[in-house]
Amino acid sequence: MPYAQQHYPFENKEHFESKIFPANFIAEGLDQTRGWFYTLMVLSTALFDRPAFQNLVCNGLVLAADGKKMSKSLKNYPDPNEILDKYGADALRLYLINSPVVRAEPLRFKEEGVFAVLKDLFLPWYNAYRFLVQNVKRVELDTGQAFNPFSANGGSKNVLDRWIASATASLVLFVRDEMDNYRLYTVVPRLVSFIGQLTNIYVRYNRSRLKGKNGTEDTLHALTALYDVLLTLCKTMAPFTPFFVEKMYQNLRRCLPDGGETEPSVHFCAFPEPSLDALDCRVETSVGRMQGIIEIGRQIRERNNKALKTPLKRIIVVHPDGGFLADLQGELQCYVTEELNVQKLETCSDPIKFATLRAEPNFALLGKRLGKEISEVAIAVKKMSQEDLLCFQRSGSVVLCGHTLSSNDISIKHEFRIPDGYAKNDIDAASGDEGAMVILELTVDQKLLDSGAARELINRLQKLRKSVGLQASDNIFIFFEAKAGAEAHSNEALIRMLKADETYLKASLGCELRHVSMMPTHAVKLASDACMLSNGASLMVTLTLPCVFFNERALLLASENSKDLSAAVSAVMISQDFTAMRADTQKHNGTITINVDGRTVTLHEGEEFMLP
């Protein structure tokens, strides 16, 4: 290669010289540096006075975990077949691609590294896919129509839908560019970062939308966005994880216009083209900064022992970029307040209101450039006034002692100043990148404690659902009662919490909390549990399958005052599938017809029965 395989110069001389030589790339191990690589270079230089190849993909040596060469006699490496059986070929492949070995450096092979790829990349990726499938099935069951990701009415206006579409287009552009330049080792870190964004930002922040909180149309927009991302990701990663994406693609292709008949395998698909119309640098930047703000807020909570379940009054975000602050007060506000469990978000572009600015020179960088003059420049940097520092933050450069310094040369530190009227334990702050600062009020009153108890109750109910094997798409009813023997203050706390957070509880649980006195005798109980909440409320909760509620008196009248007929009608309705009965009732404008022994009874929702 590339001479002998073309039988050059005895055959194919013109074809070789015009199209084959030099080769696009060659690939071999580091041990061939003094062998094949050197020989190719000598021959091509002597014959053509040019290199034999345009790109060289050189891999290092894979060593045992102790740094020694892998040896059959020492058995100092795990059985490859066991690794493949345990973790899969794709996990092993990505582990190697994401290691020093693709940069011609040695790798100490460790089984834990393959497991880390499985845990940190494949499991979150698969969970996002599984979440899509679960909610698509739920929507199809609710609407009675097949999911069609290509029938959405116009593009989604949701900021996270636009963000994930832009991030996906950026990923495709990045992978294309890196692969064109044979930089395998940069692809996997970017993929890991993207999967983290997909699961920790898009899916996490949009769970309620994907579950139908804002109605069917908005849910379809969110599901379509997630479907597009996963389909594009399958095609992009097909060269790296061929088996995993093929399994996923075989299910996703069912939603393609022709059912995927023209492209029955992901490996028959062309590499995706980036959607340039979807690229939005501002929304990508703003969402990235928002995530940074949320991480800082979590750190402040942890530092002050304020659990995330306890609501806080206010968060103040200080940042020099007015555009980002506008986004934060607009489309992104709900995500910050929900993730940090704060009731109010405020923004400020003037850091001097809450902090004293201090400049620190980057000695490592400036020392190399300025030499002995570093001392004079460092003194000048530290003497910069608050106004000078603000101007430097806005412009990104400053001239000191005849030298132009950039933001890489000087770092700005924010030293938080407690505002008037606050004690030290009432407020705290932390700084982030790009001059960001996050301030949290830490005082908690009774109203906040009750809100925290409501969040705690939701968490307990979700764990109870999980304990009986319920899926996120499974509908249930929830009934409660004050725990027997509870003291008066406990009952007061329970009533106060349920009244104040009724809307929040209903939205989070997907159903109303009903008193146990309303539970029909025919309700199928799934689980019960006692809950002692942090605000002092104590209650028993019971989960049941969805069931029909009857107005016994109205049902008797509709059944011609026949108790036997009324009992038979109720028995028929109780035996029917709840979801199917609800869909049938909606289809017939709130009425349902029951036939019993040749007698027909027409019932009206809201009169003889209810389907909550």
Image (cartoon, grey):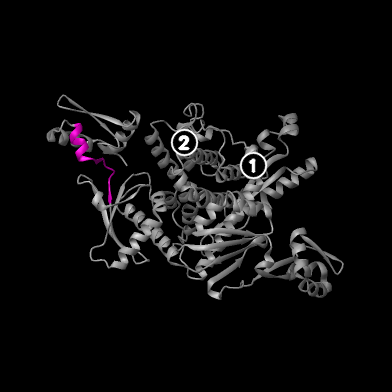
Residue in the picture at 45% in, 67% down: 445
Q: Say whether residue 532 is visible.
A: no
Q: Give the structural element (helix, strand or loop) at label 1.
A: loop
In this rendered view, identify the residue nearer to me: 278 or 316. Answer: 316
Taking depth in this image into account, of 182 and 599 the one nearest to the observer is 599
* Mark 1 or 2, closer to the camera: 1
Q: Which residues are magenta?
A: 543-558
Element marked by disc 2: helix
Of residues 461 and 516, the one nearer the viewer is: 516
What is the total number of numbered labels drawn onto the structure image?
Answer: 2
Which quadrant: the N terminus? Answer: top right
Report the Cα–Cα distance between label 1 and label 2. 24 Å
Front in this rendered view, residue 105 or 163: 163
Residue 563 on the magenta span: no
**What quarter of the picture does the C terminus occupy?**
top left
Q: Residues within 10 Å of mark 1 (few under 14, many from 20)?
A: some
In which quadrant of the rendered view does residue 105 lie? bottom right
Q: Using a 10 Å C-alpha cutoff, classify the residue at mark 2 as few (fewer than 14 neighbours), some (14 to 19) or many (20 or more).
A: some
Left of 589 or right of it: where is 209?
right
Three-letter code for the amino acid on which mark 1 is drawn: Leu
Q: Disc 2 marks which residue? A: 252
- Mark 1 or mark 2, which has the lower sequence index? 2
Give amino acid for label 2.
Leu
Residue 6 in percent (x, y) is at 68, 33
User: From the viewer's perspective, is residue 438 above or below residue 551?
Assistant: below
Q: Which residue is mark 1?
A: 279
Q: Is residue 548 magenta?
A: yes
Horizontal side of residue 147 vs 318, given as left or right: left
Q: Is residue 517 visible?
A: yes
Residue shown at the point (62%, 36%) measured from the top left: 273
